[in-house]
Amino acid sequence: MMETVAVPNATKRFRYGVITFMLFWCALIVVSGAYVTTPLFGVFEDTFQVSKTMSAWTSSSFSFFYAVGFLLFGPLADRIGRKQIILLGLFSLTLVTIWIGMVSSFGSLIALRGLQGFVAATFAPSALAYAFEIFPKQKLVTTIGFISFGYVTSGIFGQVIADLIYQWANWEMVFLFLGGMYCITFVAVIFLLPNTAREQGKKGVRFYLYHSKLILKQRNFLLTYSITIMLLLTFMGMYTLLGSYLSGEPYNLSGEAILGIRALGIIGMVISPLTGRIVQRIGLLLTLRIGLGMAVLGLFLLGIGSHIVFLVLMSIIYVMGISMIFPAIMMVIGELGGERRALANAFYAFILFIGAMLGPIIAIWLLSIGSYRSTFFILSLLLVIGFVLSMFIQVKSQVQGT
């Protein structure tokens, strides 16, 4: 077993920049697993002869069990250590992801995607608490911004990598490649992330039930979690629609062109690591509200525009807004959580990916009873509700950026 070192000694031995990069990379590569099947829905429909709704479960299965896993691995990280949980997850992800690349039935694919999501849940609940333990407050917001950058970029990165590898080889190779990346990351984490001190004492089920009740009774948490569920719901919903929207009349774009448009979304994501500086200048809650406003604007105009350049610009504005919201929400949770930060973050991650699970299902259902434009409008309306709710959140001590 690796020796546990105190946080001050750990931070002397490891440069903050290296730790920040590793947390960013882990967020990027782990959460990319949630999105790799989004551009492959049509492939699964043809390969396994299933409906569009059924093919969406290759995404929703991951998201559901990913969300459930947070409720287990968040408390478990308190007992055995953040880094140990992250390593357990990366090792398990390596095995499960390679296994997915070898299946031949749709039922096995759905089941293993659920297992993949469950073990992927080891990272996110541990990452925020880990950052709060390792970094001094003046560096914390920048680090959280980079972790969030990894989360939001994974939404594009996962789709683009999956599409590129599929066009080069086949869908099985997507998972074999991803499994290889998890293996490399596992080795890197062993050497590059310092250990932190474990929680003193053993916390049983009664402890977590008691503190869960305290969290879920607080109005600020309820408001923040209500906004959280809308983030990946609209994000997954939007990207589920965008490919088929642009491949049909009147655009008739090729797979390569749609891949390029997905990749352009990364332009909007570069704001995420800069969110710390924005918070420093204008405050945490105002940053959150501006992000929500931009996301509403981009998604609403995406539904009413027609020119392809305009649609691309609106998708970038939407992604830019979402990329501001993620780190802002994480900072709000961190400030509200206090000593219950790890548990509060586990609930945040659980709710976030319940939204991711619902996104493709709701988007496809709305499209079946309406049109692309009405579906984009309804998704933007959800974010309007989130903006209104944000006006009632109060954070006593706002984090300052660097």
Image: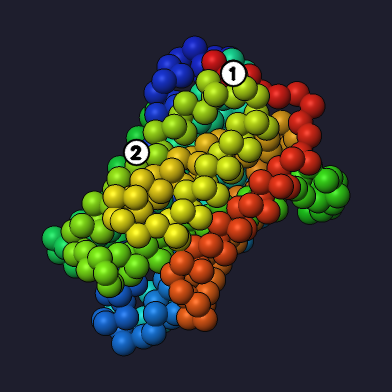
Could you tell me residue 57's position as x and y percent? 46, 74
The relative height of residue 385 versus residue 342 in the rendered view (above or below) is below
Q: Which amino acid does label 2 sit on?
A: Ile
Q: Residue lying farthest top?
A: 12
Residue at 41% of width from left, 20% of height from top?
17
| Figure check: 252 above or below 292 | below
Q: Residue at x 26, y 69 (%)?
A: 250
Q: Between 145 and 8, which is closer to the camera in this rendering?
A: 145
Q: Name the residue under label 1.
A: 281
Compare residues 110 and 49 and report the one nearer the observer.
49
**Do labels 2 and 1 touch, CB within 8 Å?**
no
Q: Where is residue 36 in the image (x, y as percent from the top left)?
A: 35, 59
- The residue pinned by badge 2 equals 267
Q: Which of 178 and 299 is in front in this view?
A: 299
Image location of residue 312, percent across then percent down: 33, 50
Report the number of numbered marks.
2
Which one is nearer the viewer's eye here, 369 or 130? 369
Give the number of the disc on residue 136.
none
- The secondary structure type at the circle numbered 1 is helix
Quarter of the image containing the C terminus?
Answer: top right
Left or right of 14 on screen, residue 336: right
Q: Quadrant of residue 170?
A: bottom left
